[in-house]
Amino acid sequence: MSMSQQAPVASSEFPQGMHRLKGRFSDGLHVNAAVWAPSIPSIDVHFQREDGRWAFETLPGLDGGVHHGVVGPIPPGARYGFWPTGEPLPPSPGPGPGQLLLDPYARAIEVEEAGGTGEDPVYFSVFVEESFDWGGSSRPRRPWRDTVIYEAHVKGLTKLHPGIPEELRGTYAGLAHPVMIEYLLELGVTAVELLPVHFSIDEPHLGPLGLSNYWGYNTLGFFAPHSAYATAAARAAGPAAVLAEVKSMVKALHEAGLEVILDVVYNHTAEGGKDLPTLCWRGLGDTDYYRHDGAGRYLDTTGVGNTLDFSQPKVIEFALDSLRYWVEEFQIDGFRFDLAVTLGRDETNTYTPRHPFLVAVGASSALRGTKLIAEPWDVGMGGWQTGNFPQGWGDWNDRFRDTARDFWLRDQASLRAGGHAGSPARLADSLAGSQNLFRHSGRTPLASINFVTAHDGFTLADLTAYDRKHNEANGEENRDGSNDNRSYNHGAEGRTENDAIIAAREQTARNLMATLLMSVGVPMITAGDELGRTQRGNNNAYCQDNELAWISWQQDAAAERMITATRALLRIRRRFLAGQSPAFPGRVADSALLWFNASGLPMTPADWDDPSTRVVQLMLADPDGQAGALIAVNGSLTDRKIHLPAAWILQGQGLAEARATTMELAFDSADPALRRSGARISLGESDSLAANSVAVYLCQRYVGRSAS
């Protein structure tokens, strides 16, 4: 009996998108189609049949602004799109329809290039049926305090890697290759945070410049993976194979104990301003999906032309559905939310940590246990909200970034020019996890996502080699990118053959890496910083899909020194944490952070206020009162003699069990070959701390602990 002869199958407004019907009257060929378009009286779905011909059906149901109906038969891999009933179809530059309205819930998107006609490309939603065998793979669920994040680009990470087969370089499969996984494990990171892998497109202004959107912060499909990062074989096999490659990547990383965090961009869409082509949301409901001001103009808090309106319940539902999909279907471990303040703006466009979206994310059982990371700012009024996100969230700590750069770069430049520098007070706060910044939101230092660099801005090496940005290759006459970099070129702009300058730059880079990896909180390393990667002074390489932005794996002696230092610091971090209570540093009772001056005496208010005080020691104490780790910082231009705090002084600071303990020098940024590592120094004894350097000492009982 045909579908037309069967009892009618009721359609549903949920779930949105295209889903194969299941149940008593299903023939396995038809789908339930649903799309929120409250401003459109009636809507059709246009789709390809088995023979490739196009057909359309009107969705008869309408509930809560969601049009829905049973349509088909629709084969796997069929292209489709929506269009208002009775409205003239858009012109087509080739065979098939022109630009239909994409399904916001499409699991895959394909593009039909115009092919030299001057026309815009046409994008199609694709119906995909998913299945994947996860086997025994499961999410690692690593605690926040043991997490080390590695921010990377799927393509740029492996595109130039000589140890990965050429056909896999720059792909999801390349990231999952054993060579790459082994590298990440040996480095010591625990989570890979991937720049956007949602389907994205280029901004129109880039094409005439011969450039493209490399970073991917221009999303066209929030449920669809970016197919260009899949291998040629997967792309040729179709969208289902692309999805399988992404899942295989996640599975391989999980089996190695590595978490996968996605950078997601729910604050705006690729449709841009109203002068750009309508592709999806603008056609389905411009005033429903996007924020507008009283005059009907887009209210833009993202700086890219449009802003999704998170005062709309259906927009919140859309973002939540997308997050749940990536967790449930791809086993993703967490998300970094681009311009997250926009997602917490209410109907008055004011940020509130009690925003329904933020509350719903925290209350979702499907998202429970995922890592939630906010980029805690946007470009609107009241847009800086670092420290103001709810419990359960971590914030990118830009105050940490700026403070570390000020102390090691800007202050050093000022001192070398005969000027003044700040006291170590702000650096000390950063080393201690920026507790004052997060305390009022009820969060611990583990809410601080510490970073010195990110994809946006100078690389670590470039911070030490350039006083100003060099973005001429971006085609905007160097107007783009931040001018506030807090960098210092150490006496020469860019590349130099001066050995003294090169050595100084490398030491400063090690200081910054040590500050990042030894601070309380959750560190984030930008991929390539551990190798001394340069972008030749470009601090906004979003449009550089080339060797300028890709990671070079041709390691010279300088790269070897930097990666040796980074691995050593991460080993020290693991060994120290292995000796702490699982509650460290989340509970004050299980954490003791004590501050001392160069003489090993407790810091006084006068010490903190004195800008000439550029030497400070931080003792991170073991919960049982034993000395744990000592971080000694010398931000001055001269070598300094320091005294480690004596046992009796530690006892006076509340460590009743402290006794004469031997400390072992585990790291010295002025010793790139690590020749001094292993030197033993007892509490109360003196040591020499080189100018502009960091040294880390470990209580001897941590030395030799497993690095796992």
Image (cartoon, helix red, strand yellow):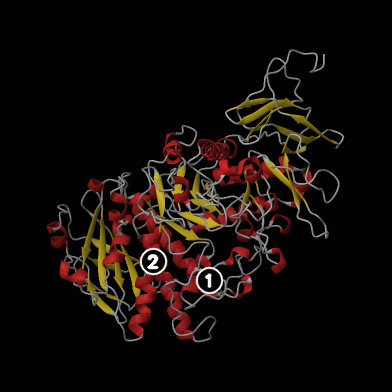
Query: Relative to 497, does residue 548 appear above or below in the rendering?
Result: above
Q: Earlier in the sequence, mark 2 or mark 1?
A: 2
With 619 as the anchor, is 452 left or right in this view? right
Q: Amino acid at mark 1?
A: Ala
Residue 80 can be seen in this image: yes
Residue depicted at x 42% and y 72% = 486
Q: Which residue is mark 2?
A: 402
Please state which of residues 189 and 488 is positioned toward the viewer in this rendering.
488
Within-10-Å neighbours for mark 1: few <14, some 14–19, many 20+: some
Please state which of residues 111 and 575 is positioned toward the viewer in this rendering.
111
Please state which of residues 244 and 398 is positioned toward the viewer in this rendering.
398
Q: Secondary structure at mark 2?
A: helix
Query: Relative to 33, does residue 399 appear above or below in the rendering?
Result: below
Q: Position of residue 278 (x, y in %)?
A: 68, 49
Q: Position of residue 508 (x, y in %)?
A: 41, 74
With 354 as the anchor, is 468 left or right in this view? right
Q: CA distance from mark 2 to mark 1?
A: 25 Å
Residue depicted at x 14% and y 62% = 649
Q: Position of residue 162 (x, y in %)?
A: 67, 63
Q: Position of residue 462 (x, y in %)?
A: 50, 73
Within-10-Å neighbours for mark 2: few <14, some 14–19, many 20+: many
Q: Which residue is mark 1?
A: 559
Displayed quadrant of residue 663: bottom left
The label shown at residue 90 is none
Q: Amino acid at mark 2?
A: Asp
